[in-house]
Image (spheres, grey):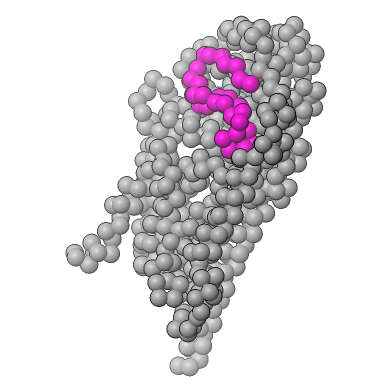
Amino acid sequence: MHQLLRDHWLVVPLFAIGIFATGFHAIPILTALYPALLLHYSRKEWRNVLFAYIIASLSTTLAIMGMFDGDAEAPSFQHPGTVFGLSLFGNLVVLWCLAVDHFIQDTCIWQRILVFPCLWAGSWLLFTAVAPFGDIYVYSNPVLGWSDLVQAAATIGGRPMIDFVLALGSTILLELKHSWDAPVFLRDEEDAGEPISSRIHFWKSPTPLYAIFVGVLLFYGGIQTSIYPGSFFQVGYPDYVPETVPVGCVVGPGNINQELQLQHEHWFNKTTKLAEAGAKMILWSEETAQVHDPEEEAALLQRGKDIAREHSVYIALTYDLLGPIQQNKLVLVTPQGDIGIDYIKAHPVPFVEPQPAGPNVLPFVDTPEFGRVGAAICFDFNFPSFMLQSSKNKVDLMLQASWTWGPIGTYHSQGNALRAVENGFTMLRCGSQGLSGVFEPVSNGLFTQHLPSVNDSAYIFNLPLRKRRWTLYGFIGDTFGYICLVLGIAAAGYRLYKVIQEKRASRIEL
Protein backbone atom coordinates (compact mmCIF):
# COMPACT_ATOMS: atom_id res chain seq x y z
CA MET A 1 0.00 0.00 0.00
CA HIS A 2 2.83 2.37 0.86
CA GLN A 3 4.45 1.75 -2.53
CA LEU A 4 1.11 2.25 -4.30
CA LEU A 5 0.58 5.61 -2.63
CA ARG A 6 4.15 6.61 -3.44
CA ASP A 7 3.74 5.75 -7.11
CA HIS A 8 0.28 7.26 -7.60
CA TRP A 9 0.01 10.14 -5.14
CA LEU A 10 -0.26 12.52 -8.10
CA VAL A 11 -3.61 11.07 -9.22
CA VAL A 12 -5.79 13.27 -7.00
CA PRO A 13 -3.89 16.53 -7.72
CA LEU A 14 -3.96 15.70 -11.45
CA PHE A 15 -7.70 15.19 -11.35
CA ALA A 16 -8.40 18.36 -9.36
CA ILE A 17 -6.00 20.56 -11.34
CA GLY A 18 -7.34 19.18 -14.62
CA ILE A 19 -10.81 20.54 -13.87
CA PHE A 20 -9.37 24.08 -13.68
CA ALA A 21 -6.73 23.65 -16.37
CA THR A 22 -9.29 23.02 -19.13
CA GLY A 23 -12.86 24.01 -19.80
CA PHE A 24 -15.07 26.89 -18.77
CA HIS A 25 -13.44 27.92 -15.48
CA ALA A 26 -9.81 27.33 -16.43
CA ILE A 27 -6.99 29.23 -14.75
CA PRO A 28 -4.31 29.96 -17.37
CA ILE A 29 -1.28 29.15 -15.22
CA LEU A 30 -2.77 25.72 -14.48
CA THR A 31 -3.37 25.24 -18.19
CA ALA A 32 0.32 25.91 -18.82
CA LEU A 33 1.49 23.52 -16.07
CA TYR A 34 -0.99 20.69 -16.66
CA PRO A 35 0.92 18.95 -19.51
CA ALA A 36 4.04 18.89 -17.31
CA LEU A 37 2.10 17.14 -14.54
CA LEU A 38 0.67 14.62 -16.99
CA LEU A 39 4.15 13.93 -18.35
CA HIS A 40 5.71 13.61 -14.91
CA TYR A 41 3.13 10.98 -13.96
CA SER A 42 3.01 9.08 -17.27
CA ARG A 43 6.79 8.78 -17.62
CA LYS A 44 7.11 6.52 -14.57
CA GLU A 45 5.66 3.36 -16.12
CA TRP A 46 3.55 2.30 -19.07
CA ARG A 47 0.30 1.77 -17.19
CA ASN A 48 0.47 5.35 -15.94
CA VAL A 49 -0.02 6.51 -19.54
CA LEU A 50 -3.46 4.89 -19.53
CA PHE A 51 -4.22 6.17 -16.04
CA ALA A 52 -3.27 9.71 -17.13
CA TYR A 53 -5.65 9.45 -20.09
CA ILE A 54 -8.50 8.34 -17.83
CA ILE A 55 -7.78 11.11 -15.32
CA ALA A 56 -7.62 13.74 -18.04
CA SER A 57 -10.89 12.50 -19.54
CA LEU A 58 -12.69 12.62 -16.18
CA SER A 59 -11.33 16.08 -15.42
CA THR A 60 -12.29 17.41 -18.83
CA THR A 61 -15.78 15.96 -18.45
CA LEU A 62 -16.34 17.98 -15.28
CA ALA A 63 -14.66 21.04 -16.80
CA ILE A 64 -17.13 21.13 -19.72
CA MET A 65 -20.13 19.38 -18.14
CA GLY A 66 -22.52 22.13 -19.27
CA MET A 67 -21.42 21.93 -22.92
CA PHE A 68 -24.86 20.83 -24.16
CA ASP A 69 -27.14 22.67 -21.74
CA GLY A 70 -29.35 23.83 -24.59
CA ASP A 71 -32.66 23.65 -22.73
CA ALA A 72 -32.96 26.91 -20.79
CA GLU A 73 -35.72 25.53 -18.56
CA ALA A 74 -34.03 22.23 -17.64
CA PRO A 75 -31.49 21.77 -14.80
CA SER A 76 -27.78 22.15 -15.49
CA PHE A 77 -25.59 19.33 -16.83
CA GLN A 78 -28.23 17.92 -19.15
CA HIS A 79 -26.13 15.44 -21.17
CA PRO A 80 -23.30 14.07 -19.00
CA GLY A 81 -22.97 10.85 -21.00
CA THR A 82 -22.45 12.73 -24.25
CA VAL A 83 -19.92 15.06 -22.64
CA PHE A 84 -18.00 12.10 -21.19
CA GLY A 85 -17.93 10.40 -24.58
CA LEU A 86 -16.61 13.55 -26.22
CA SER A 87 -13.95 13.89 -23.51
CA LEU A 88 -12.79 10.33 -24.07
CA PHE A 89 -12.61 11.01 -27.79
CA GLY A 90 -10.84 14.38 -27.52
CA ASN A 91 -8.31 13.11 -25.00
CA LEU A 92 -7.16 10.41 -27.40
CA VAL A 93 -4.73 13.14 -28.49
CA VAL A 94 -3.39 13.23 -24.93
CA LEU A 95 -3.12 9.43 -24.80
CA TRP A 96 -1.23 9.28 -28.11
CA CYS A 97 1.23 12.03 -27.16
CA LEU A 98 1.91 10.62 -23.69
CA ALA A 99 2.42 7.12 -25.09
CA VAL A 100 4.98 8.24 -27.66
CA ASP A 101 6.73 10.40 -25.06
CA HIS A 102 7.03 7.41 -22.74
CA PHE A 103 8.37 5.27 -25.58
CA ILE A 104 11.24 7.64 -26.43
CA GLN A 105 12.35 8.38 -22.85
CA ASP A 106 15.48 6.23 -22.99
CA THR A 107 16.96 8.29 -25.81
CA CYS A 108 18.98 11.47 -25.91
CA ILE A 109 17.86 14.69 -24.28
CA TRP A 110 16.76 16.47 -27.45
CA GLN A 111 14.15 13.77 -28.11
CA ARG A 112 12.89 13.96 -24.54
CA ILE A 113 12.47 17.70 -24.96
CA LEU A 114 11.21 18.11 -28.52
CA VAL A 115 9.17 15.05 -29.51
CA PHE A 116 6.28 15.69 -27.14
CA PRO A 117 5.81 19.38 -28.12
CA CYS A 118 5.95 18.48 -31.81
CA LEU A 119 3.37 15.74 -31.42
CA TRP A 120 1.22 17.87 -29.10
CA ALA A 121 1.03 20.77 -31.56
CA GLY A 122 0.67 18.61 -34.66
CA SER A 123 -1.83 16.14 -33.21
CA TRP A 124 -4.21 18.82 -31.95
CA LEU A 125 -4.02 20.39 -35.41
CA LEU A 126 -4.85 17.05 -37.03
CA PHE A 127 -7.72 16.56 -34.57
CA THR A 128 -9.02 20.01 -35.45
CA ALA A 129 -8.82 19.25 -39.16
CA VAL A 130 -10.46 15.80 -39.23
CA ALA A 131 -12.83 15.72 -36.24
CA PRO A 132 -16.18 17.52 -36.50
CA PHE A 133 -15.52 19.57 -33.35
CA GLY A 134 -12.88 21.99 -34.63
CA ASP A 135 -10.59 23.46 -31.99
CA ILE A 136 -13.18 23.82 -29.23
CA TYR A 137 -11.49 21.08 -27.12
CA VAL A 138 -7.88 22.16 -27.59
CA TYR A 139 -6.22 22.64 -24.20
CA SER A 140 -4.65 26.03 -25.02
CA ASN A 141 -7.92 28.01 -25.09
CA PRO A 142 -7.57 29.42 -21.55
CA VAL A 143 -4.17 31.05 -22.21
CA LEU A 144 -5.37 33.16 -25.14
CA GLY A 145 -5.44 36.16 -22.81
CA TRP A 146 -1.62 36.20 -22.66
CA SER A 147 -1.61 38.85 -25.33
CA ASP A 148 2.06 39.33 -26.31
CA LEU A 149 2.83 35.60 -26.47
CA VAL A 150 -0.40 34.77 -28.29
CA GLN A 151 0.05 37.67 -30.71
CA ALA A 152 3.49 36.48 -31.77
CA ALA A 153 2.79 32.75 -31.89
CA ALA A 154 -0.60 33.04 -33.60
CA THR A 155 0.58 35.39 -36.35
CA ILE A 156 3.57 33.11 -37.09
CA GLY A 157 2.25 29.57 -36.75
CA GLY A 158 -1.36 29.85 -35.59
CA ARG A 159 -2.73 27.93 -32.63
CA PRO A 160 -0.28 25.02 -33.22
CA MET A 161 2.59 27.33 -32.32
CA ILE A 162 0.85 28.34 -29.10
CA ASP A 163 0.43 24.65 -28.28
CA PHE A 164 4.07 23.99 -29.15
CA VAL A 165 5.38 26.77 -26.90
CA LEU A 166 3.32 25.58 -23.92
CA ALA A 167 4.24 21.91 -24.39
CA LEU A 168 7.92 22.77 -24.84
CA GLY A 169 7.81 24.62 -21.54
CA SER A 170 6.52 21.44 -19.91
CA THR A 171 9.32 19.22 -21.20
CA ILE A 172 11.92 21.88 -20.33
CA LEU A 173 10.53 22.05 -16.80
CA LEU A 174 10.74 18.28 -16.37
CA GLU A 175 14.25 18.22 -17.81
CA LEU A 176 15.49 20.26 -14.85
CA LYS A 177 15.51 17.12 -12.71
CA HIS A 178 17.89 15.51 -15.25
CA SER A 179 20.01 18.61 -15.50
CA TRP A 180 21.29 19.55 -12.07
CA ASP A 181 24.58 17.80 -12.70
CA ALA A 182 24.98 18.25 -16.46
CA PRO A 183 22.23 20.39 -17.96
CA VAL A 184 23.37 20.12 -21.55
CA PHE A 185 21.30 20.23 -24.70
CA LEU A 186 21.76 17.83 -27.64
CA ARG A 187 23.97 15.59 -25.56
CA ASP A 188 23.55 11.88 -25.05
CA GLU A 189 23.67 10.35 -21.59
CA GLU A 190 26.86 8.43 -22.36
CA ASP A 191 28.66 11.75 -22.84
CA ALA A 192 27.29 13.38 -19.72
CA GLY A 193 30.44 12.76 -17.69
CA GLU A 194 32.75 14.69 -19.98
CA PRO A 195 33.90 18.12 -18.78
CA ILE A 196 32.40 21.16 -20.46
CA SER A 197 33.19 24.85 -20.22
CA SER A 198 30.72 27.16 -18.48
CA ARG A 199 30.12 29.15 -21.68
CA ILE A 200 29.22 26.05 -23.72
CA HIS A 201 27.38 24.71 -20.68
CA PHE A 202 25.07 27.75 -20.72
CA TRP A 203 24.36 27.82 -24.44
CA LYS A 204 23.68 24.09 -24.60
CA SER A 205 21.35 24.11 -21.60
CA PRO A 206 17.68 23.77 -22.59
CA THR A 207 16.34 26.20 -20.00
CA PRO A 208 18.24 29.32 -21.18
CA LEU A 209 17.54 28.43 -24.82
CA TYR A 210 13.83 28.16 -24.08
CA ALA A 211 13.93 31.45 -22.18
CA ILE A 212 15.58 33.13 -25.17
CA PHE A 213 13.01 31.60 -27.53
CA VAL A 214 10.08 32.82 -25.44
CA GLY A 215 11.78 36.17 -24.94
CA VAL A 216 12.06 36.66 -28.71
CA LEU A 217 8.39 35.78 -29.12
CA LEU A 218 7.38 38.21 -26.37
CA PHE A 219 9.50 40.94 -27.95
CA TYR A 220 7.95 40.39 -31.37
CA GLY A 221 4.45 40.16 -29.92
CA GLY A 222 5.06 43.25 -27.81
CA ILE A 223 5.98 45.24 -30.90
CA GLN A 224 2.66 44.33 -32.52
CA THR A 225 0.51 44.99 -29.46
CA SER A 226 2.28 48.16 -28.31
CA ILE A 227 3.18 49.94 -31.55
CA TYR A 228 0.06 50.66 -33.58
CA PRO A 229 0.61 51.04 -37.35
CA GLY A 230 1.58 54.62 -38.09
CA SER A 231 2.17 55.55 -34.45
CA PHE A 232 5.96 55.22 -34.38
CA PHE A 233 7.74 57.26 -33.06
CA GLN A 234 5.43 58.92 -30.49
CA VAL A 235 3.03 60.14 -33.18
CA GLY A 236 -0.04 61.97 -31.91
CA TYR A 237 -3.50 60.40 -32.05
CA PRO A 238 -4.87 62.62 -34.85
CA ASP A 239 -2.09 61.46 -37.17
CA TYR A 240 -2.57 57.69 -36.94
CA VAL A 241 -5.88 56.73 -35.33
CA PRO A 242 -8.13 55.56 -38.17
CA GLU A 243 -11.66 56.76 -38.76
CA THR A 244 -14.39 54.80 -37.00
CA VAL A 245 -18.03 54.24 -37.88
CA PRO A 246 -20.88 53.06 -35.66
CA VAL A 247 -22.04 49.49 -36.26
CA GLY A 248 -24.94 47.65 -34.69
CA CYS A 249 -25.68 44.25 -33.21
CA VAL A 250 -29.20 42.87 -32.85
CA VAL A 251 -29.16 39.99 -30.38
CA GLY A 252 -31.85 37.44 -31.11
CA PRO A 253 -33.91 35.25 -28.78
CA GLY A 254 -31.44 32.39 -28.46
CA ASN A 255 -32.92 29.41 -26.64
CA ILE A 256 -34.81 31.47 -24.05
CA ASN A 257 -37.64 33.08 -26.04
CA GLN A 258 -37.54 31.13 -29.28
CA GLU A 259 -41.12 32.04 -30.13
CA LEU A 260 -39.77 35.52 -30.93
CA GLN A 261 -38.03 34.06 -33.99
CA LEU A 262 -41.37 34.22 -35.80
CA GLN A 263 -42.03 37.86 -34.87
CA HIS A 264 -39.95 39.33 -37.67
CA GLU A 265 -41.14 42.89 -37.20
CA HIS A 266 -39.81 42.83 -33.64
CA TRP A 267 -36.28 42.42 -35.00
CA PHE A 268 -36.75 44.88 -37.83
CA ASN A 269 -37.87 47.50 -35.29
CA LYS A 270 -34.60 47.03 -33.39
CA THR A 271 -32.69 47.20 -36.67
CA THR A 272 -34.44 50.45 -37.65
CA LYS A 273 -33.63 52.05 -34.30
CA LEU A 274 -29.96 51.17 -34.68
CA ALA A 275 -29.95 52.62 -38.21
CA GLU A 276 -31.61 55.81 -36.96
CA ALA A 277 -28.92 56.00 -34.24
CA GLY A 278 -26.26 56.08 -36.96
CA ALA A 279 -25.21 52.44 -37.41
CA LYS A 280 -23.81 51.82 -40.90
CA MET A 281 -23.57 48.04 -40.60
CA ILE A 282 -26.06 45.98 -38.57
CA LEU A 283 -25.49 42.31 -37.80
CA TRP A 284 -28.07 39.95 -36.34
CA SER A 285 -26.97 37.15 -34.02
CA GLU A 286 -27.30 33.60 -35.31
CA GLU A 287 -30.82 32.43 -36.21
CA THR A 288 -32.51 35.58 -34.95
CA ALA A 289 -35.52 34.83 -37.17
CA GLN A 290 -37.19 31.72 -38.52
CA VAL A 291 -39.01 31.11 -41.80
CA HIS A 292 -40.87 28.01 -42.89
CA ASP A 293 -40.40 28.06 -46.65
CA PRO A 294 -38.86 30.04 -49.53
CA GLU A 295 -41.95 32.29 -49.73
CA GLU A 296 -41.53 33.46 -46.13
CA GLU A 297 -37.79 33.79 -46.75
CA ALA A 298 -38.43 36.08 -49.72
CA ALA A 299 -40.74 38.26 -47.61
CA LEU A 300 -38.14 38.51 -44.83
CA LEU A 301 -35.42 39.49 -47.29
CA GLN A 302 -37.65 42.04 -49.00
CA ARG A 303 -38.34 43.73 -45.67
CA GLY A 304 -34.62 43.84 -44.99
CA LYS A 305 -33.94 45.32 -48.43
CA ASP A 306 -36.52 48.06 -47.86
CA ILE A 307 -34.94 49.11 -44.56
CA ALA A 308 -31.42 48.92 -46.02
CA ARG A 309 -32.37 51.23 -48.90
CA GLU A 310 -34.34 53.61 -46.70
CA HIS A 311 -31.52 54.10 -44.19
CA SER A 312 -28.56 53.44 -46.52
CA VAL A 313 -27.21 50.72 -44.25
CA TYR A 314 -25.76 47.21 -44.57
CA ILE A 315 -27.91 44.60 -42.80
CA ALA A 316 -26.77 41.01 -42.15
CA LEU A 317 -29.97 39.03 -41.60
CA THR A 318 -29.75 35.63 -39.96
CA TYR A 319 -32.50 33.06 -39.92
CA ASP A 320 -33.39 29.40 -39.77
CA LEU A 321 -35.01 28.19 -42.99
CA LEU A 322 -37.06 25.10 -42.17
CA GLY A 323 -37.92 23.82 -45.62
CA PRO A 324 -37.76 22.24 -48.04
CA ILE A 325 -34.24 21.65 -46.66
CA GLN A 326 -33.35 23.10 -43.27
CA GLN A 327 -30.63 25.75 -43.52
CA ASN A 328 -28.90 28.07 -41.07
CA LYS A 329 -28.39 31.23 -43.12
CA LEU A 330 -26.76 34.66 -43.12
CA VAL A 331 -27.68 37.12 -45.88
CA LEU A 332 -25.95 40.49 -46.18
CA VAL A 333 -28.09 43.16 -47.80
CA THR A 334 -26.32 46.25 -49.21
CA PRO A 335 -27.55 49.86 -48.94
CA GLN A 336 -28.73 49.55 -52.55
CA GLY A 337 -31.00 46.65 -51.59
CA ASP A 338 -28.85 44.02 -53.30
CA ILE A 339 -27.77 40.67 -51.87
CA GLY A 340 -24.03 40.93 -51.17
CA ILE A 341 -23.63 37.59 -49.35
CA ASP A 342 -25.97 34.60 -49.28
CA TYR A 343 -24.38 32.06 -46.95
CA ILE A 344 -25.34 28.70 -45.43
CA LYS A 345 -23.50 27.61 -42.29
CA ALA A 346 -20.67 25.30 -43.36
CA HIS A 347 -20.06 23.60 -39.99
CA PRO A 348 -23.23 22.69 -38.06
CA VAL A 349 -22.60 21.76 -34.42
CA PRO A 350 -22.54 17.94 -34.00
CA PHE A 351 -25.45 16.53 -31.96
CA VAL A 352 -27.11 19.97 -31.92
CA GLU A 353 -27.76 20.98 -35.52
CA PRO A 354 -29.12 18.16 -37.71
CA GLN A 355 -29.27 20.19 -40.93
CA PRO A 356 -26.80 19.50 -43.77
CA ALA A 357 -23.67 21.62 -44.02
CA GLY A 358 -23.40 24.39 -46.58
CA PRO A 359 -20.55 24.69 -49.08
CA ASN A 360 -17.10 24.86 -47.52
CA VAL A 361 -16.48 28.26 -49.10
CA LEU A 362 -16.06 31.51 -47.15
CA PRO A 363 -18.14 34.22 -48.86
CA PHE A 364 -17.06 37.84 -49.28
CA VAL A 365 -18.13 41.04 -51.00
CA ASP A 366 -16.26 44.26 -51.78
CA THR A 367 -17.73 47.43 -50.31
CA PRO A 368 -16.62 51.08 -50.67
CA GLU A 369 -17.05 51.75 -46.93
CA PHE A 370 -15.63 48.67 -45.20
CA GLY A 371 -13.32 47.16 -47.80
CA ARG A 372 -13.67 43.44 -48.40
CA VAL A 373 -16.28 41.98 -46.06
CA GLY A 374 -16.60 38.27 -45.29
CA ALA A 375 -19.09 36.38 -43.14
CA ALA A 376 -19.45 33.08 -41.32
CA ILE A 377 -21.66 31.68 -38.59
CA CYS A 378 -20.67 30.71 -35.06
CA PHE A 379 -19.04 27.24 -35.13
CA ASP A 380 -17.43 27.96 -38.53
CA PHE A 381 -14.82 29.99 -36.62
CA ASN A 382 -13.68 26.86 -34.78
CA PHE A 383 -12.14 25.52 -37.99
CA PRO A 384 -8.83 27.31 -38.70
CA SER A 385 -8.41 25.79 -42.17
CA PHE A 386 -11.81 27.13 -43.18
CA MET A 387 -11.07 30.59 -41.82
CA LEU A 388 -7.71 30.65 -43.65
CA GLN A 389 -9.76 31.49 -46.73
CA SER A 390 -10.09 34.98 -45.26
CA SER A 391 -6.33 35.45 -45.66
CA LYS A 392 -6.30 33.95 -49.13
CA ASN A 393 -9.08 36.33 -50.18
CA LYS A 394 -7.62 39.31 -48.25
CA VAL A 395 -10.74 39.95 -46.18
CA ASP A 396 -10.63 43.18 -44.15
CA LEU A 397 -13.76 42.74 -42.02
CA MET A 398 -15.31 39.46 -40.91
CA LEU A 399 -18.90 39.24 -39.65
CA GLN A 400 -19.67 36.51 -37.15
CA ALA A 401 -23.23 35.74 -36.09
CA SER A 402 -23.29 33.42 -33.10
CA TRP A 403 -25.64 31.65 -30.72
CA THR A 404 -24.28 29.79 -27.70
CA TRP A 405 -25.98 28.45 -24.59
CA GLY A 406 -25.38 27.48 -21.00
CA PRO A 407 -21.89 28.33 -19.68
CA ILE A 408 -19.91 28.16 -22.95
CA GLY A 409 -20.36 31.74 -24.23
CA THR A 410 -17.12 33.36 -23.05
CA TYR A 411 -14.99 30.27 -23.69
CA HIS A 412 -16.30 29.97 -27.24
CA SER A 413 -16.00 33.70 -27.99
CA GLN A 414 -12.37 33.90 -26.87
CA GLY A 415 -11.38 30.95 -29.03
CA ASN A 416 -13.15 32.43 -32.06
CA ALA A 417 -11.40 35.79 -31.57
CA LEU A 418 -8.07 34.02 -32.18
CA ARG A 419 -9.01 33.77 -35.88
CA ALA A 420 -8.79 37.57 -36.14
CA VAL A 421 -5.22 37.54 -34.80
CA GLU A 422 -4.15 34.63 -37.01
CA ASN A 423 -5.55 36.09 -40.22
CA GLY A 424 -5.20 39.81 -39.60
CA PHE A 425 -8.84 40.86 -40.04
CA THR A 426 -11.11 42.95 -37.85
CA MET A 427 -14.16 41.05 -36.61
CA LEU A 428 -17.66 42.26 -35.80
CA ARG A 429 -19.30 39.63 -33.63
CA CYS A 430 -22.94 39.49 -32.57
CA GLY A 431 -23.88 36.61 -30.32
CA SER A 432 -26.72 35.54 -28.08
CA GLN A 433 -25.47 34.32 -24.70
CA GLY A 434 -21.88 35.14 -25.62
CA LEU A 435 -19.59 38.08 -26.29
CA SER A 436 -20.62 40.69 -28.85
CA GLY A 437 -18.46 43.52 -30.15
CA VAL A 438 -15.42 44.44 -32.19
CA PHE A 439 -12.34 42.21 -32.08
CA GLU A 440 -9.09 43.38 -33.61
CA PRO A 441 -6.20 41.54 -35.29
CA VAL A 442 -4.17 42.62 -32.27
CA SER A 443 -4.71 41.11 -28.81
CA ASN A 444 -6.09 43.80 -26.50
CA GLY A 445 -6.04 46.32 -29.35
CA LEU A 446 -7.02 49.98 -29.09
CA PHE A 447 -10.46 49.42 -30.59
CA THR A 448 -11.35 46.09 -29.02
CA GLN A 449 -14.83 46.47 -27.53
CA HIS A 450 -17.01 43.66 -26.33
CA LEU A 451 -19.62 42.85 -23.74
CA PRO A 452 -21.62 39.83 -22.66
CA SER A 453 -24.93 39.83 -24.52
CA VAL A 454 -27.81 37.59 -23.53
CA ASN A 455 -30.98 37.80 -25.62
CA ASP A 456 -33.44 40.23 -27.22
CA SER A 457 -31.25 43.33 -27.13
CA ALA A 458 -29.35 45.74 -29.38
CA TYR A 459 -25.94 47.44 -29.15
CA ILE A 460 -23.79 49.94 -31.03
CA PHE A 461 -20.00 49.67 -31.31
CA ASN A 462 -17.37 51.81 -33.04
CA LEU A 463 -15.61 49.95 -35.83
CA PRO A 464 -12.21 51.16 -37.12
CA LEU A 465 -12.01 51.47 -40.91
CA ARG A 466 -8.76 49.86 -42.03
CA LYS A 467 -7.27 47.17 -44.20
CA ARG A 468 -6.29 43.75 -42.90
CA ARG A 469 -2.87 43.14 -41.40
CA TRP A 470 -0.54 40.73 -43.14
CA THR A 471 0.42 37.70 -41.05
CA LEU A 472 2.89 34.90 -41.74
CA TYR A 473 0.26 32.40 -40.65
CA GLY A 474 -2.13 33.78 -43.23
CA PHE A 475 0.55 33.10 -45.86
CA ILE A 476 1.83 29.65 -44.81
CA GLY A 477 -1.32 28.40 -43.10
CA ASP A 478 -0.88 25.37 -40.84
CA THR A 479 2.52 24.45 -42.27
CA PHE A 480 4.22 24.85 -38.89
CA GLY A 481 1.79 22.47 -37.20
CA TYR A 482 2.08 19.80 -39.87
CA ILE A 483 5.89 20.04 -39.85
CA CYS A 484 5.75 19.46 -36.10
CA LEU A 485 3.52 16.42 -36.62
CA VAL A 486 5.83 14.92 -39.27
CA LEU A 487 8.94 15.49 -37.13
CA GLY A 488 7.30 13.98 -34.06
CA ILE A 489 6.13 10.89 -35.91
CA ALA A 490 9.51 10.55 -37.65
CA ALA A 491 11.37 10.66 -34.32
CA ALA A 492 9.02 8.05 -32.85
CA GLY A 493 9.43 5.90 -35.97
CA TYR A 494 13.20 6.13 -35.76
CA ARG A 495 13.07 5.08 -32.12
CA LEU A 496 10.87 2.11 -33.03
CA TYR A 497 13.31 1.16 -35.79
CA LYS A 498 16.24 1.24 -33.32
CA VAL A 499 14.35 -0.92 -30.83
CA ILE A 500 13.58 -3.49 -33.51
CA GLN A 501 17.22 -3.50 -34.65
CA GLU A 502 18.43 -3.97 -31.07
CA LYS A 503 16.09 -6.93 -30.55
CA ARG A 504 17.24 -8.54 -33.79
CA ALA A 505 20.86 -8.07 -32.79
CA SER A 506 20.25 -9.65 -29.39
CA ARG A 507 18.56 -12.66 -31.01
CA ILE A 508 21.51 -13.15 -33.35
CA GLU A 509 23.92 -13.08 -30.39
CA LEU A 510 21.87 -15.72 -28.63
Q: How many labels sit on residues? A: 0
**Quadrant where the C terminus is found in the figure:** bottom left
What segment is highlighted magenta in the picture?
Answer: 434-462
Please determine whether, in this image, residue 229 is positioned above or below residue 254. Answer: below
Please determine whether, in this image, residue 79 is positioned above or below residue 256. Answer: below
- Comparing 348 with 446, the one in front is 446
**Quadrant where the N terminus is found in the figure:** bottom left
Residue depicted at x 37% and y 32%: 77
User: How far across and down, in percent of the image, does residue 23 sit?
Assistant: 43, 40
**Horizontal side, residue 30 vs residue 502: left or right:** left
Q: Is residue 427 magenta?
A: no
Is residue 246 among what the camera can see?
A: yes
**Horizontal side, residue 41 vs residue 120: left or right:** left
- Comparing 221 with 276, the one in front is 221
- Comparing 151 with 73, the one in front is 151
Is residue 319 among what the camera can see?
A: no
Residue depicted at x 38% and y 30%: 78
Q: In which quarter of the image is residue 5?
A: bottom left
User: How far across and down, in percent of the image, does residue 437 sit?
Assistant: 58, 25
Residue depicted at x 51% and y 26%: 434
